[in-house]
Image: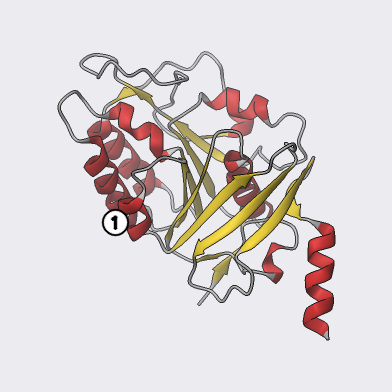
């Protein structure tokens, strides 16, 4: 069983990563660091010479790039595809942020702010992504966030069952190790049932630098299911004191 590392420092002592070729879920409240973990996962692959893809259903590509300007992550060679929901016929619920997409992925270093917007409903989104997957084999993919997929469904369609169908589409066509990012919301049971691994990021009170990674489901042995992570300029790493205490205990 081959493991694909999440790229989080010292995490592999606790869990090797994601099972190769599977769909996996990372969810949690806004601001818990889900996108940072997703970018670490892709950056780790890019450093290994892998082709990696970030699918943004939540934020315009160059905004993603700007959000990581002060972090020491290798983003240049990450391919990015962003998508904007068609406004005509949508429900009244508005997305928090509107997105400027590109029809085909480009590397982060080649992003242009004047790209023509590519609006899509879920069917055209899937059709375009199928072409993307046919053109290039990606070793790692992040979808951020599956929660925003609800805005790609036209009025009258069941977006919850649609999310389920979209995940099945990814399983059929992506041929990659996929990390799905989702906001913490009540209707995740269907999504969790499709996942090989499920992780929850729990924000800590009085700290915006420390979160708990809670392992709810995994294909690998995991001795500890609640792992504190600390944020640095290089991204998240396992809290040093927690890591050393665990290693010393294992060596006894």
- In terms of image quadrants, where is residue 75? top right
Looking at the picture, does residue 70 appear above or below residue 177? above
When the figure is inspected, residue 99 is found, relative to residue 206, above or below; the finding is above
- Quadrant where the C terminus sits is bottom right
Q: Residue at 60% across / 47% down in the picture?
A: 202
Please state if 118 lies on the left or on the right of 89 as rendered. Answer: right
Secondary structure of the residue carrying tag 1 is: helix
> Outermost residue, bottom direction?
252
Q: Which residue is drawn at 19% across and 35% down?
A: 158
- Decide if residue 137 is on the left or right side of residue 162: right
Return the x and y of residue 144 as percentages of the image width and height.
Answer: 48, 38
Whether residue 129 sits left or right of residue 39 in the image: it is left
**Color style of the picture:** secondary structure
The reply to whether residue 46 is in sight is no
Q: In this view, does 64 lie above or below 45?
A: above
Is the residue marked by circle 1 packed among few (<14), some (14-19), or many (20+) residues within 10 Å? few
Asked which quadrant contains residue 11, the reply is bottom right
Residue at the image point whose x is 38% and y is 56% from the top:
192
Q: Nearer the viewer, residue 139 or 20?
A: 20
Q: Camera-side residue: 66 or 133?
A: 66
- Residue 87 is left or right of residue 236, and the answer is left
* Residue at figure coordinates x 62%, y 57% from the top left: 6
Which residue is under mark 1?
172
Can residue 141 be seen in this snapshot?
yes
Q: Percent x, y for residue 215?
A: 55, 61
**Could you say which quadrant of the image residue 149 lies in?**
top left
Return the x and y of residue 79 as percentages of the image width and height.
54, 39
Q: Is residue 134 above or below residue 152?
A: below
The location of residue 150, given as percent across then percent down, is: 31, 32
């Amino acid at each position: 069983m081959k493991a694909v590392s999440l790229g989080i420092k010292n995490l592999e002592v606790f869990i090797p990563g994601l099972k190769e070729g599977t769909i996996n879920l990372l969810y949690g409240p806004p601001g818990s660091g889900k996108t940072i973990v997703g970018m670490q996962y892709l950056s780790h692959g890019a450093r290994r010479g892998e082709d990696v893809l970030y699918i943004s259903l939540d934020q315009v590509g160059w905004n993603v790039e700007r959000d990581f300007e002060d972090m020491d992550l290798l983003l240049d060679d990450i391919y990015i595809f962003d998508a904007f929901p068609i406004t005509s016929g949508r429900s009244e619920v508005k997305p928090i942020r509107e997105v400027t997409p590109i029809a085909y992925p480009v590397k982060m270093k080649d992003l242009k702010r004047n790209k023509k917007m590519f609006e899509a409903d879920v069917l055209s989104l899937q059709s375009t992504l199928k072409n993307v997957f046919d053109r290039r084999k990606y070793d790692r993919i992040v979808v951020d966030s599956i929660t925003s997929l609800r805005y790609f469904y036209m009025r009258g369609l069941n977006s919850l069952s649609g999310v389920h169908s979209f995940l099945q589409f990814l399983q059929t066509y992506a041929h990659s190790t996929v990390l799905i990012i989702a906001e913490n919301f009540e209707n995740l049971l269907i999504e969790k049932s499709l996942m090989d691994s499920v992780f929850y990021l729990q924000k800590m009170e009085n700290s915006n630098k420390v979160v708990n990674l809670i392992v709810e489901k995994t294909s690998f042995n995991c001795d500890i299911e609640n792992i504190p992570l600390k944020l640095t300029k290089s991204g998240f790493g396992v809290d040093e004191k927690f890591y050393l205490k665990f290693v010393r205990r294992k060596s006894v």
